Amino acid sequence: MLLLKIALRPWRLAAFSQVFSSIAVGFLLLLAGFMYWMQSGLKPVLERLRAEQVITAYVAHDAEAAIQASVVDSIRLTLGAHPAEVKVVEPKDFVANLKSQFPDLGRELEDLGPEMEHVVPRYVSVSGVLPDSMLAEIRAVPGIESAESSKDRYHHVLGAFSALRWVARLLAGGLCLALLTGLIHLARSNAYLHRDALALMRLWGANEGILRVPGILSGLAVGWLGGLLACMGWITGGAWLARNIRSLSPMLRDMPLFTGELAWLLLAAGGLIGIVAGIFGGIAGSAAAAARPGQGR
């Protein structure tokens, strides 16, 4: 009980410093938690973008009718056991889809009449989880003039998301390092408020381990309170934040929704950082008590 009273002494003598430090700890922890959620949430997005692709295979106009009719069957045989959706898009279907977004352009194509089939391509859309070699195999199918994959179009997106994950990791690590540095500075400052009581305990014969306990408890109190604020902040706004991030793009739909485990992780992280900072504060408090004039060993 005596050690706890000594540990809480900074809360009596410098309450505003402890409270505002706890608020700063909570905010930085919440921000670091968001960075952690983002970098871990982008992992399934990247895995899906790397695995899934849409191959657009254009049917040659000069191919014989029998070859054009067998193109889909040949593609299905090429796919083998790979799960994929194969769909033939006729020129009229292409124009109908185009007309829903660009009415004027769609009507101009329809006005071409029979010539429309020579202007609008007929293609086969193959979508699913496919190996990288599938594009070359589909290009080799008789009757296919050319083929392209969505992987080629989204290559820059994969690079951007990968870079974003690394940036999020660096920011989360930097925030935790800045948080630890600030708490160590606070703990060393609190050590001078413990100095008189620790010097008296040293005269009573307390060893170094006992003298460091108040500093550790003081750091734990600030870190744990900050972790509690971060935990409450994530529980309150985490679901709203995750939902809005997922709604920014269809590619982000695989990001996880609100997870309560992260809230308790923030609470534990706050306490752990507080303990580490408190260890430095305890060492500083013990040294300050030893250096106090008239309070030698």
Image: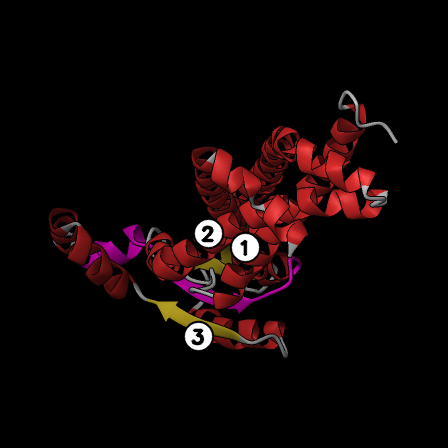
Q: Which residue is mark 1?
A: 266
Q: Earlier in the sequence, mark 1 or mark 2?
A: 2
* Mark 2, other Cα within 10 Å: few <14 / some 14–19 / many ≥20: many
Q: Which residue is more in the foreground, 141 or 149?
A: 149
Give the position of the N terminus as an image quadrant: bottom right
Q: Position of residue 226 (x, y in %)?
A: 50, 48
Residue type indicated by callout 2: Ala
Mark 3 and mark 1: span between their CA atoms? Answer: 60 Å
9, above or below 272, in the image: above
**Mark 3 touches mark 1? (CB < 8 Å):** no
Callouts 1 and 2 close, C-beta under 8 Å: yes
Residue 69 - label: 3
Q: Residues within 10 Å of mark 3 (few under 14, many from 20)?
A: few
**Earlier residue among tags 2 and 3:** 3
Residue 98 place in picture, x, y as percent: 22, 55
Picture residue at 29% right of the left edge, 54% below the top: 120
The magenta stretch is: 113-133
SS assignment at label 1:
helix
Residue topped by disc 2: 230
Q: Is residue 120 magenta?
A: yes
Marks 1/2: CA distance? 6 Å
Residue 131 is situated, as x and y percent measured from the top left of the image, at 64, 63
Give the structural element (helix, strand or loop) at label 3: helix
Give how far across and how far down residue 54 sits, in percent.
48, 60
Instruction: Kindly check if marks 2 and 3 are in contact, taking CB atoms under 8 A apart as contact.
Output: no
Q: Residue at x 13, y 48 (%)?
A: 108
